[in-house]
């Protein structure tokens, strides 16, 4: 990439650091309903299905907007789009405090959800500062901004206490912090190198339709479905676990928020490690570990509290099997860790194979992944109401990760057989660019 010839290490560090901090704030705002939503639920007398829809609504906007925001970031530069996005979202968060009916809350939540679209803007902006051999690590570091979910789950309950249990005060603080972040981001950053080069040459970025061209490849949609789990389920659990802990184990909201933060933290900070491992050992290996371990963890977590009655010699013998709280917390930490690695592994390939369409491809993958964060909490709430089992959400996720693992394995075998017909399987084969089928048109559509 010729436009990177004069870029210094300091400029790269500034762009990456500023983008990561901004994404952290945006992600914290995006998941605010995991805490204040519980207060609103009590205030409005919502059932679990209504609550699930409420906390998931911001995720819908943040997901759908990603493809548009990603394309605009490629067209007009990530710096400008990022700044405007944060300012508009800050206004939406402030407006939230004026809602007093369920419908109004849902409408306000749609505006607040724009914060989630910051991811597509960020990857388009950050990737332009690094050569392809460093993009996995750089985007992994940027993805650490997911820690914003942990910040909200840990800090928002205490902020709520500081305001005497009044959730509106928390929302005002979040709006103010986001607005300040937008201003500081614009001040301390520069246009990305590709945007600077286009400005110097008077060239406009590719049009909207052209940016969508790579979406015809099946490979892009497969990446998106992987992300539906590693990111969508991550967000869904970050939103739902406070409800799960307070309901299933009778914990206080502050304690439930803390335990959720313990899950969300490794799901964020190790994304950089996932990017590094994807650069060094290949994203395929990382994804196999992610799906394999997640399947085992979900299977254990999905086991409901069960009382058995056994016909004993001297009469019926009853005993109960319940996954203890300490084990649930421990397994969610493991789950968050591997989800973090998986998120980085999925995004490793986008700037490598679609360098001129990072915004559109990354936006689409992020869109589908984000939709997981929308549909899954809604499904969790409906399953709670219909099935009446606290662990039903883990049952659903067990099925989801199993489908991902099988689909990925079949796709890899098929693509390798197409490229190396003389070989019988994936073992002893060279690294094929991990999740990338091949560069050929046929493999991309396979």
Image (spheres, rainbow, N blue to C red):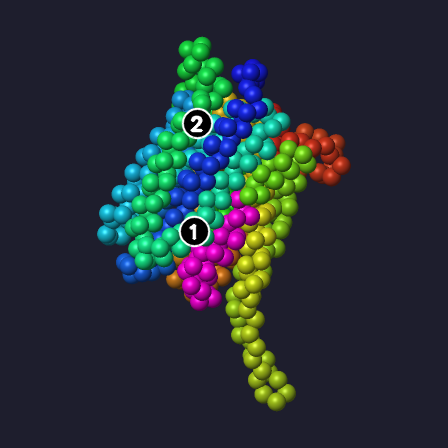
Q: Is residue 289 above or below residue 133?
A: below
Q: Is residue 137 visible?
A: yes
| Residue 279 image offset from top left, x and y in percent | 64, 33
- Could you tell me residue 432's position as x and y percent? 67, 31
Crowding at mark 2 (Cα within 10 Å: few <14, some 14-19, many 20+): few
Above or below residue 279? Residue 44 is: below
- The tag earlier along the polypeptide, 1 or 2, is 1
For label 2, the residue is: 188
Kindly report the secondary structure that dominates the magenta region of the rendered protein. Answer: helix
Q: CA distance from mark 1 to mark 2?
A: 27 Å
Q: Position of residue 244 (x, y in %)?
A: 45, 60
Q: Identify the image quadrant of the N terminus.
A: top right
Mark 1 secondary-structure assignment: helix
Question: Is residue 214 something one can see in this rendering?
Answer: no
Residue that badge 1 annotates = 155
Extreme residue toward the bottom, this view: 314
Q: Is residue 242 magenta?
A: yes
């Amino acid at each position: 990439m010729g436009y990177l010839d004069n870029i210094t290490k300091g400029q790269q560090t500034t762009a990456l650091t500023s983008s990561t901090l901004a994404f952290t704030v945006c992600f914290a705002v995006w998941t605010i309903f995991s805490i204040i939503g519980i207060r609103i639920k009590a205030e409005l007398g919502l059932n679990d299905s209504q609550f699930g829809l409420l906390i998931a609504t911001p995720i819908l906007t943040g997901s759908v907007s990603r493809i548009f925001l990603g394309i605009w970031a490629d067209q007009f530069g990530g710096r400008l789009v990022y700044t405007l996005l944060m300012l508009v979202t800050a206004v939406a968060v402030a407006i939230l405090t004026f809602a007093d009916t369920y419908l109004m809350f849902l409408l306000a939540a749609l505006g607040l959800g724009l914060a989630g679209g910051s991811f597509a803007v960020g990857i388009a902006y950050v990737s332009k500062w690094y050569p392809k051999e460093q993009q996995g690590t750089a985007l992994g570091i940027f993805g650490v901004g997911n820690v914003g979910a942990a910040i909200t789950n840990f800090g928002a309950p205490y902020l709520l206490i500081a305001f005497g249990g009044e959730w509106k005060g928390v929302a005002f603080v979040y709006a103010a912090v986001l607005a300040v972040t937008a201003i500081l981001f614009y001040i301390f950053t520069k246009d990305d190198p590709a945007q600077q080069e286009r400005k110097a040459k008077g060239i406009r970025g590719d049009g909207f339709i052209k940016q969508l061209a790579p979406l015809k490849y099946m490979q892009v949609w497969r990446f998106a479905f992987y992300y539906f789990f590693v990111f969508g389920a991550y967000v869904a659990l970050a939103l739902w676990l406070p409800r799960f802990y307070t309901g299933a184990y009778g914990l206080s909201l502050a304690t439930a928020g803390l335990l959720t933060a313990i899950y969300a933290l490794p799901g964020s900070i190790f994304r950089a490690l996932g990017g590094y491992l994807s650069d060094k050992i290949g994203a395929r290996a990382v994804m196999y570990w992610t799906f394999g371990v997640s399947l085992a963890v979900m299977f254990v977590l999905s086991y409901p509290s069960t009382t058995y009655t056994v016909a004993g010699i001297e009469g019926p013998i009853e005993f109960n099997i319940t996954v203890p709280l300490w084990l649930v917390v421990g397994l969610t930490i493991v789950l968050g860790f591997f989800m973090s690695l998986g998120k980085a592994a999925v995004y490793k390939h986008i700037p490598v194979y679609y360098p001129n369409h990072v915004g559109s491809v990354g936006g689409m993958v992020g869109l589908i992944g984000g939709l997981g964060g929308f549909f899954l909490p809604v499904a969790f709430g409906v399953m709670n109401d219909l099935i009446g089992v606290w662990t039903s959400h883990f049952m659903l996720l067990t099925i989801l990760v199993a489908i991902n693992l099988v689909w990925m394995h079949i796709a890899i075998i098929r693509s390798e057989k197409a490229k190396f017909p003389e070989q019988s399987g994936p073992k002893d084969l060279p690294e094929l660019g991990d999740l990338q089928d091949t560069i050929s048109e046929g493999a991309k559509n396979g």
